[in-house]
Amino acid sequence: MSNLAHSPAWIRFSAECKLADRDAQHLRILDAAGLRVDLSAQAWSPRFEQAGLTLLAQQGFEAARRDLFEGGLCNWTEGRAAWHTALRAPEPPAAVAAEVREGRARLRRFVEGVNARNAYRNVVHLGIGGSDWGPRLAVESLAGHDTRRTVRFASNIDAHAIDDALAGLDAQDTLVIIASKSFTTTEPLANAARVVEWMRQWGVSDPYRHIVAVTANTAAAEAFGISPDRIFSLWDWVGGRYSVWSAIGITIALVLGLDAFDAILAGAAAMDQHFLEAPLTANAPVQMALAAVANRSVLGFASQAIAPYDARLRHFVPWLQQLEMESLGKNAVRNGTPASVPTGATVWGMPGTDGQHTFFQWLHQDATGAPVDFLLCKQPDHNLTHHHRLLLANCLAQRSALLRGKSYEQALEEAQRTGGDPEQVAWLARHRVHPGRRPSTLIVLPRLAPYSLGALLALYEHKVFTQGVLWDINPFDQWGVEFGKELANKLAHDLTEPGPSGVSDLDPSTAYWVEALSPSVKS
Ligand code: F6P
């Protein structure tokens, strides 16, 4: 057992957190790279704020942040840096400057080349997890107005996904991006093989001339058939879920334009500067991380809800689920012992106002509930002011209702207004009590533009990093995912050819289903 829970800074942090105000009497709005982050509805007091600073110092935050930006071995279980900030820095750090610049220049030349030839009306992006969510979120949330090409994403191994992605496209006019850092992931490789087959069915003579790979494993991409001039590099110091800033973002540049991709990088770089330079009490990622740790490990909230009040941000939820849960869903601290306090929360959500009619009831009246991050854009990209007024009103109303709740006395007074049998009225009032004091954060973007989206993603990246430091866990590995992958590979084999020991090393239920399902996959 690690000793965080027994450390002086933790004991103080947790005691002050329980005493802190949770009624938003203090207006606490931080400005970060053009975003406004309102933490007023999170636990706060001057003493709690001080306790947070002491905890950061105890956990070595300043040195860890330096390591992150200087290419130190932040991913200590895999012996690597996690240097995604280098990819968006206007002046990349010297140690990687040459490859980063060369990578940016190659991407630019390629995109300018295809634009100049007016080539490819369609782009099909094949990747999964971090090689999918970032480009998908950017393209689908920013695509509204000015898209150069039709884009389709296929991530799932379920062939319905690739079938849907290819439906109605002209293969001769389609460019395929295989985005896979490892170039060993089942999903993009199986989907890429299907695309090659599809291109041949369309009579494309050299399908590989229609394919581009983005990978750290160039040898495997070449072995697949892609020529080196169509392979864009990625490096082992870029984590999968932090890779949208690399050439994995080529789909963004092809669909939204190079300027949009540059603006996404610039927004993220501005957030990097804020994270590096803002005083810790006014540092948005740091304060969001302290609030998240307090909510999870002290106040007992096992999950975190996300409610973007912008329908275009629907993919923000899965993007963040991967970032948070693949990064923080761990229980071993640096020395290998189990964490002494609860770590990584479950992240879930849906855009408002749909969420209001789906799960907000639970947020309002469940015994525990969950903290909520509300996101909204001040300026919409439509002229329907009436809709926007209602959207803003709903967002603010939900947040306020979760915070203030409704006491029994208030509910009773309300119920009494309709009159009736006093016992019935009292009974009904008990059903209409709302506990309130539900923590939330409100993040306001000036507009949903490439720059503010880049800043938003980097805000959460740094929040997650800081939580990793506070909990002493490595946010850059994903052993659980690897474990599941290994077993899936074995079962894929067993479904066609059970090994010499048959399926006897499986649990009885899995063994039963391997036997029962294998006829459906024997060709
Ligand atoms: O989901 C696990 C994971 O390793 C992610 O971290 C990564 O983004 C994804 O798989 C895809 O991996 P790759 O880019 O190597 O295909």
Image (cartoon, rainbow, N blue to C red):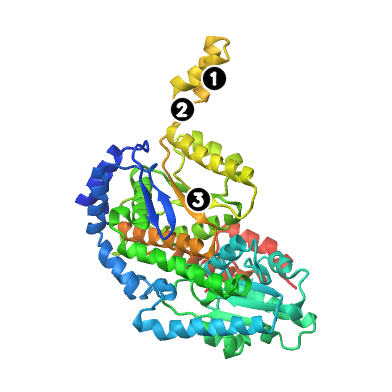
The correct choice, above or below, for 18 with respect to 419 in the image is below
* Type of amino acid at the residue the image marks with label 1: Leu
Task: Check disc 1 and report its element: helix, strand or loop.
Answer: helix
Distance from the alpha carbon under mark 3 to that under mark 2: 24 Å
Q: Nearer the viewer, residue 377 or 465?
A: 377
Task: Check disc 2 and report its element: helix, strand or loop.
Answer: loop
The correct choice, above or below, for 280 with respect to 523 in the image is above
Q: Which residue is mark 2?
A: 406
Distance from the alpha carbon under mark 1 to that under mark 3: 34 Å
Q: Which mark, by number, is residue 375?
A: 3
Whether ligand 1 has any atom under 8 Å from the Cβ at mark 3 is answered as: no
- The image quarter containing residue 258 is bottom right
* Type of amino acid at the residue the image marks with label 2: Lys
Relative placement, left or right, of 242 versus 421 is left
- Which residue appears at 53% of the width and 38% of the height? 362
Q: Which mark, by number, is residue 428?
A: 1
List the single residue furthest toward the top: 421
Residue 295 screen position, x and y as percent: 37, 46
Say whether marks 1 and 2 touch (CB < 8 Å): no
Relative placement, left or right, of 387 versus 4 is right
